[in-house]
Image: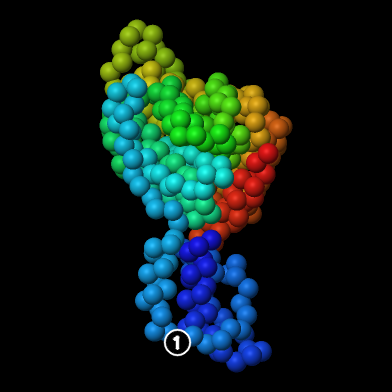
């Protein structure tokens, strides 16, 4: 990657002994630039006065320049996305955030940056969640009126947006509930340009490891009764990490809650393109047999031992390596 090249050049310039046969002193890896991937060898000494110029090159010639784009949606309102224009010879990659977050969320932002540095065209939209030009995450107790169908329509809009710009090979990458929504999208829509799904931390809404099964049953029954009599006043429900404080209309709430594990697995099995699921071995949001059930769907399952739901700390680099390997399998 360009940024890694200039960073390694900078490090070599300032820390190389310049004596043949002598290796560099050990370096501390920098989280944003995994220099550990570089082989350290002796190199002629270069004065450190070039440091400012190397830093300027690092900034100027780093990943493709990112831009925030705002587009009008067919259903009204504007949606925002982060966009990196990459090499036209490489696939375009759409990266989708998780529940109530945005493309600024750490796990998502790091994947976007990685893929952009690798020369891919990357599009990271923010689902509006019913709010025009939404930039940041939403709290549980905001009033949520948008449901799953509206979210899927926005995903479809962004896929078509890439297609309309000439991209004929598209990879969809999701994190957490973003992965679920990409599965739901591909189970019902099959754009010819979409060639691969990479679902990280794939989970579902009616999850008894997050919300007790009895609470799920009670909330579902209450929402169904309200919706049946036409009462769409916002109420407090439990959904994902929002326990008793997710404020939503009953029908919008049900559109998410109905995506339980069985429905997710059935949808995953129906998708006609290659599917890769990347999981953290220490992710406690899944039942004991979840991996076995995922494997039965026909998806390729990759487990990163010790990683959490968010692949934080040193596991970020493992996620990045597995992600690049998955994209490299594109037929």
**Badge 1: few (under 14), some or many (20 or more) residues near its Cα, within 10 Å?**
few
Residue 36: x and y in percent read 58, 70
Count the numbered circles shown.
Answer: 1
Q: Please give the residue where the numbered disc 1 appears in the rendered image.
A: 47
Foreground of the two, 282 or 21: 21
Foreground of the two, 38 or 84: 84
Quarter of the image where one finds residue 270: top right
Foreground of the two, 240 or 280: 280
Q: Farthest residue to the top: give it.
A: 229
Image point 52% across, 48% down: which residue?
Answer: 87
Whether residue 180 is visible: no
Answer above or below: position of 239 versus 59: above
Image point 49% across, 39% down: which residue?
Answer: 94
Residue 10: x and y in percent read 47, 76
Q: Farthest residue to the bottom: give it.
A: 19
How is this picture coloured? rainbow
Residue 264: x and y in percent read 58, 28
Query: SS of the residue at dot 1?
Result: loop
Image point 50% across, 62% down: which residue?
Answer: 2
Say which quadrant the C terminus sits in.
top right
Answer above or below: position of 40 versus 3: below
Image point 52% across, 41% down: which residue?
Answer: 92
Residue 265: x and y in percent read 62, 28
Whether residue 169 is visible: yes
């Amino acid at each position: 990657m360009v940024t890694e090249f200039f960073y390694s050049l900078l490090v070599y310039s300032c820390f190389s002994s310049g004596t043949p046969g002598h290796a560099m002193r050990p370096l501390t890896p920098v989280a944003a630039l995994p220099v550990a991937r570089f082989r350290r060898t002796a190199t002629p000494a270069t004065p450190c006065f070039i440091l400012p110029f190397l830093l300027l090159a690092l900034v100027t010639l780093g990943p493709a320049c990112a831009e925030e784009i705002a587009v009008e949606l067919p259903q009204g309102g504007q949606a925002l996305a982060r966009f990196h224009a990459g090499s036209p010879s490489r696939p375009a990659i759409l990266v989708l955030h998780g529940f109530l977050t945005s493309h600024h969320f750490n796990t998502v932002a790091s994947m976007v940056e990685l893929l952009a540095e690798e020369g891919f065209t990357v599009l990271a939209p923010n689902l509006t969640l019913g709010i025009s030009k939404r930039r940041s995450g939403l709290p549980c107790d905001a009033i949520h009126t948008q449901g799953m169908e509206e979210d899927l329509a926005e995903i479809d809009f962004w896929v078509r947006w890439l297609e309309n710009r000439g991209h004929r090979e598209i990879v969809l990458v999701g994190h957490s509930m973003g992965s679920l929504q990409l599965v739901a999208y591909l189970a019902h829509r099959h754009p010819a340009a979409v060639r691969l799904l990479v679902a990280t931390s794939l989970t579902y809404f009616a999850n008894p490891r997050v919300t007790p099964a009895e609470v799920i049953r009670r909330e579902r029954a209450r929402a169904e009764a309200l919706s049946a009599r036409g009462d769409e006043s916002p109420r407090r429900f439990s959904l994902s990490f929002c326990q008793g404080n997710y404020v939503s209309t009953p029908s919008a709430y049900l559109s998410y809650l109905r995506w339980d594990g069985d429905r997710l697995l059935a949808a995953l099995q129906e998708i006609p393109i290659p599917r890769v699921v990347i999981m953290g071995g220490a992710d406690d949001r899944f039942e004991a047999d979840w991996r076995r059930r995922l494997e039965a769907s026909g998806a390729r399952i990759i487990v990163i031992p010790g990683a959490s739901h968010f692949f934080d700390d040193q596991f970020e680099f493992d996620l990045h390596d597995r992600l690049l390997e998955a994209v490299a399998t594109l037929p």
